Image (spheres, rainbow, N blue to C red):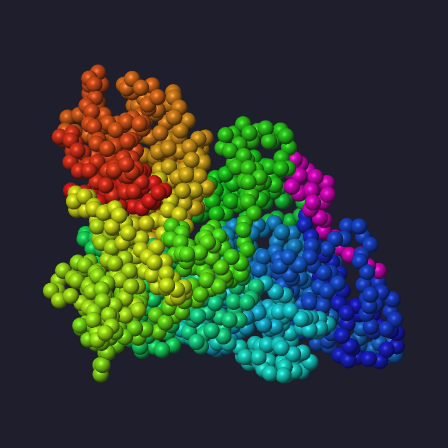
Amino acid sequence: RKQGNSGFKKGTQRKPKSLPPLDPEVLSVFMPPFISRDDTQVMNAGNSLNKSKRRSFRKKKERPKVENVKSLNVEQKAPDTEDITVPKDIDLLGLPQLCFPGGLYITSESKEDHIHFLVFTDVCGNRTYGAVAQYYQPLQVCYFTHPGKMPVCFVPFAVCVISRYPYFNALKDCLSCLLVQLRPLQDLDVEEHIKEFSAKLFLIPSPPPGPLHLVFNMKPLQIIIPSREDPDSPIIDLDLHLPLLCFRPEQVLQIMTCILTEQKIVFFSSDWALLTLVAECFMLYLHPLQWQHTFVPLLSRQMLDFVMAPTSFLMGCHTDHFEEVSMEIEDLVLINIDNGDIAHSKMAEEEPEIPDVPAQAAEAFIKRVESLQLHYDLELCHLRASTDLGELQMRRRAWQQKLNTEVQQTALQLIVNIFREVKDHLNYEHRVFNSEEFLKTRAIGDQPFYRKVLETYMFHSFLKARLNRKMDAFARMDLSTQTEEDRFNLMFHTPRRLTMEKMASKRFNPQYVVSRRMVISMPDLQEIRLPEAPTRKSSLRKLECTFCLLSAVRMPSKSTSTFKIPEIHFPLIFQCVHSYYTDFYNHLSKAINTLPPDNSALLARYFYLRGLISLMQGKLLNALSDFQNLDKTDLRIFPTDLVRKIVETMAPAERLQADRKPELKKLISRVMENQREVMKIDDHVKNFELPKTHMQLDDFVKRIQESGIVKDIDTIHRLFDALTVGHQKQIDPETFRDFYNYWKETEAEAQEVNLPPTVIQHLDKNECVYKLSSSVKTNYGVGKIALTQKRLFLLTEGGRPGYAQIAAFRDIEDVKSTTVAFLLLRIPTLRIKTLSKKEVFEANLKTECDLWYLIVKEMWAGKKMADDHKDPQYIQQALTNVLLMDAVVGALQSSKTIYAASKLSYFDRMKNEVPMMVPKTTSETLKHKINPSAGETFPQAIDVLLYTPGHLDPSERPGNAHPKLWCALSEGKAVVFDASTWSIQQHCFKMGRSKLTCMIMVEQSQVWIGSQDSNIYIINTHSMSCNKQLNDHRSDVTDIVVDKKSGIPSSLDGAVIAWNISTLKVNRVFQLPCQNLTSIKLHNDQLWCCTGSCILVVSTHEFQLQLKIEHHLKDVCSHFLCFQLFPEVFYLNLWASYSGSSDLYIWNTKDFSSPPQKIHLQDCSEITCMIRVKAQMWVGSSARLQGKSKGKIYVVSAEKKTVEKELVGHADTVRALCSAEDRYVLSGSGREEGKIAIWKAE
């Protein structure tokens, strides 16, 4: 609480209104805890967490001597009272000036109370927030020379509340209530009342992130403490549309540009409150980007010299100082909130130009802002008048919350539209951003903006988050607004070229420069394909740009709940506080017990709050139990640091009690081990630079990957061989530079290719022109040969350019490089024979002939491989190979260039050296192959596959309705495909760092994933997030089955736990009498458990052991590897395999005394997995074919017990199998290949 010194000299003739401004001083500071020291010790017995708490104090000060009008506090000194302490990072000397930023004046008449806001930033960038309420109290002044009626003057006082959180509206409402309550009180009562007010605020907890707001009573208002949306989101407790009322959308974009380019910015307003609120709004508009520089949105008149700082800043001043600031300091951006003007300080020699926000992002933003309903009065027009203050307040809050969400989404869409293509120029492995290439792909008019932004600290931090694959608001919106083209681009790393569709769009929009990679057409997947209109040729209508489409995206606002905090009773003594905490705990317990178990989001918030209350009560074990429940409700809000601090400060007796409870012991172990295992996050970012020294192979691989040209290591090795032909095996910087520049120049030239409409209409909309020859003479006429991913065609020249089909790659029959006689010359000529034409195409390519010969043969071989193996990635690899050949020839310019380029003819060489004939049965059954390791440096083994059903037609059900394919890779990673199109839906889930062992959909909204780290991770299939886990197992989780409403996982140590799927509570626990439990199957209330030495059968009702099947082989080293149950009409068959064996064994479960039937699998080394599909058993294995290790699948008839098909579709062991609704079978291979094959189930 602050006041001005008001001592007067005897006999002064001045009237109060003519007094100069006074220096404000601090009268009182109130800080927690607010109960006596003795009570504190009683309350916190056994709870050493509160030892560092500080006491409240009231500053003791003698009355100043009456000497003159000026303040006696010219040099303030720290108080001598030993109890007086100052809040951390708050300058008690500077704070009074900020509470009276315009100066403290005694007035002759009272003024209206008003509130403004403060922001304090420490040296680490952490912010603290303040809300200040000013009010006036009368003071009678005696003039000795003029006896009579004593005049009344009014002295301003201020109450400042400091908070770690930006609860602007909540603190404003609290202070408003306080001012009402202070009016009738005397001075001493005021002090006590403010102390009680402070204590009440201290006892209100801050809600955890999520859908729960807290409400408490501060008569006459109900105060709402809002939560942040998620742990990474900011708290929003202010009116986000304020800048949109003060500025036009174009000006808002200008201001955001100034912030993004880190200018020196000064806001001006005659309203002190607006300065902070508007500045904070702009900070929130930038989220998740963060302002990294000085942020002082409110400067008092004594602090004006702050604007002379040499570095970037954002500050705020009163409009009275506008002329002074603008005339004396240069290079400032001056923003007047009151009249919406944006100007520059006068001293600048040249007015700095503020670059425009990228045109299409700006257009989308302006359209969206203009569609917002910003005026509450318009909302009220059709509503009845409210007669209740509480109802009026809640109605206004609901409207504001909805509008805040819309404004937040609009600003976030702007940020995503501006920066979404940054990821296309990142190399995650080496943490490199190729800024020059990114700039080249921007529209000419947008480049000044990007050139400035790319140099800022803010953008550098943004890059770190992208390279760390942080799933923040930006990443979530980017993912949710991805087009099908974007998803396919994740699967195929191809050089950037314009598709025909975008080329047609570009003809109408010269500003539009496309940088997205082209979408690749997929093979016809028949029934499992996303239904769409038949493929049509590109029309020349004007296409909507991606940005405009994104501007129409409206995210649904998330519903929130409120929890009413119990009343706090005074006087402020220990018993009252203890009673308050008890009531709070009981209220939360009641809410937990009455809430439906499937509402895990609210349950998590109640557990969190109850844990905090138990902590304040000193009940540490109760607090740990509640925090442990967050594992099963919402892991994101688990307070790791707080739990660690609790554990470190527990008394030995309490720690012993905690260790006796298995769930708490595991929680403590996990938290403390995580602290020891904390790895320093590598957050450096490099900008790509050309090498300056000679490179050996390893360094060359790294440099090429950093450049973004190609990632595959085998391809880079072949490129290294090509560039070092005839030289020692190292590459000099000049050769690398020539190669890199030629590659980029070719890429840039291809962007400028502009085919006429008559040509575009002959091509598919997703085709791209990758290479054009020089103008050559052919038997089809004179023109340029064009290469796409599907065909060769001639771009004929003459009066009107035309199209002549040369050959689709799949139709080529033969390619020859020869010469034809012309006068005395022999002209190199390329001949291409196709299956569909009798006439052979001939082109006099002269010096280009040898290169085109290599290119056509490689594309022909690549297309044949892609068709034979149903793997479209082969054609992408072939495309990369031919473009690398082109760059090698262009860079080397020597007699050996063609020989060097031939080193990159990978598919052509494979076709000639090892004919890649795919067996007919395999070719007929195989439908498609996909690569979940796309974009990675190495292929990764596929450990588990899971298909979850959905709807092929999105109109059947809105939202996330498509079927999905879940694929577990190494180190806890999982990739999710949209199974209707086989495009990547979610690039990477990360669940721990251990191998994932099993997956199952336990209900429509939950997928459970078991891991070798003994945890079960629960994925919400609607939000596609992992916020829960089950951690009661003590060993590797090996398998999971579902029985009605129970999920039953098993672990390697023989433990089987049945969980209620809805409540995630343990129903039953069973320990098998043996170890090494590798898999389980459920059939007719019996659980079949496979261990190394035997298979056990257990009743699911009582978990009683019913049967034990010993393995029958004489080889003591062998053990059961995998098994399946196959119900027949009158009995159940058990199919099993042994380690190191190529035989399948089948038992009739009604007669285990008889020896099992044996089926020998030819060429099989070991059976690795099996799955029942219709009346067949599909068996995955490791096989030896032609001396090489392969993955082979055997389709065995369950009725005949014979092998019906042998499918050879993988270059490594088949490690995983799953069925897609018995129509398709999906198989995943080991790390040598790392691909998924999709097979038709007959």
Looking at the image, which is closer to me, 177 or 610? Answer: 610
**Quarter assignment of residue 96:** bottom right
> Could one spot residue 500 in this view of the protein?
no
Q: Quadrant of the C terminus?
A: top left
Q: Which residue shows up at 36% across the image and 42% down it? A: 1231
Q: Residue furthest left?
A: 838
Relative to 589, say whether 146 is above or below.
Answer: below
Instruction: Give x and y (percent) for residue 224.
Output: 52, 57
Instruction: Give x and y (percent) for residue 618.
Output: 61, 38
Q: Which residues are magenta?
A: 34-62
Instruction: Give x and y (percent) for residue 171.
Output: 59, 60
Relative to 896, say whether 783 is above or below.
Answer: below
Relative to 322, say whether 166 is above or below.
Answer: above
Relative to 1144, say whether 876 is above or below.
Answer: below
Looking at the image, which is closer to me, 189 or 682? Answer: 682
Is 136 situated left or right of 1220 in this image?
right
Residue 53 counted in the magenta span: yes
**Quarter assignment of residue 902:** bottom left
Is 596 situated left or right of 17 in this image?
left
